[in-house]
Amino acid sequence: MSTNNDHDQAVQRFRDSIPLFQALSDPARQDIILLLAEHNSLNVTDIANRSRLSRPAISHHLKILRDIGLVSIVQQGTQRYYSLSLEDAVSQLKSLISTVEQTCL
């Protein structure tokens, strides 16, 4: 039987996950994530060449993904290369799922 504390914890985990869900909800960002999953790292030009979006739009979406921690950057000379950094997001989602399983099922 779940307690009020369990319920509060579940609600908090959901609320903590909102920025991640918002970042993942955009199809353009989903496309970027899938592109980066296929390649070790890409720069903005590489991503734009494989996308229907402009370079400024790609940069905008990469900033959102970077801010939420889904993408990391490595500077190589004048180029910035982006790669996936999913460990924290996966951990957050696993924690949410575990809390839901314990509280709601």
Image (cartoon, rainbow, N blue to C red):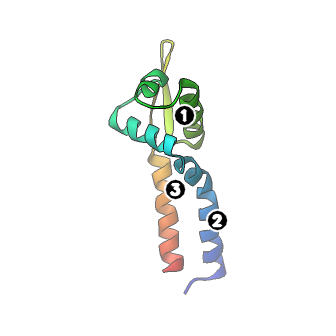
Q: Is residue 41 above or below residue 96?
A: above
Q: Which amino acid lies under the numbered mark 3 shown in the image of this protein? A: Gln
Tell me whether circle 2 and circle 1 mark residues in contact (CB < 8 Å): no
Residue 37 % position (x, y): 37, 39
Q: CA distance from mark 2 to mark 1?
A: 27 Å
Is disc 1 placed on a helix, strand or loop? helix
Residue density around tag 2, few if under 14, some if 14–19, many if 20 or more, within 10 Å: few
Q: Quadrant of residue 86?
A: top left
Task: Work out whether 72 lies above or below 104.
Answer: above
On residue 92, the disc is 3
Residue for point 53% across, 30% down = 58
Residue at the extreme left:
38
- Say left or right for 19 vs 99: right
Choose the circle earlier in sequence order: 2 or 3.
2
Q: Which mark is residue 62?
A: 1
Q: Nearer the viewer, residue 54 or 99?
A: 54
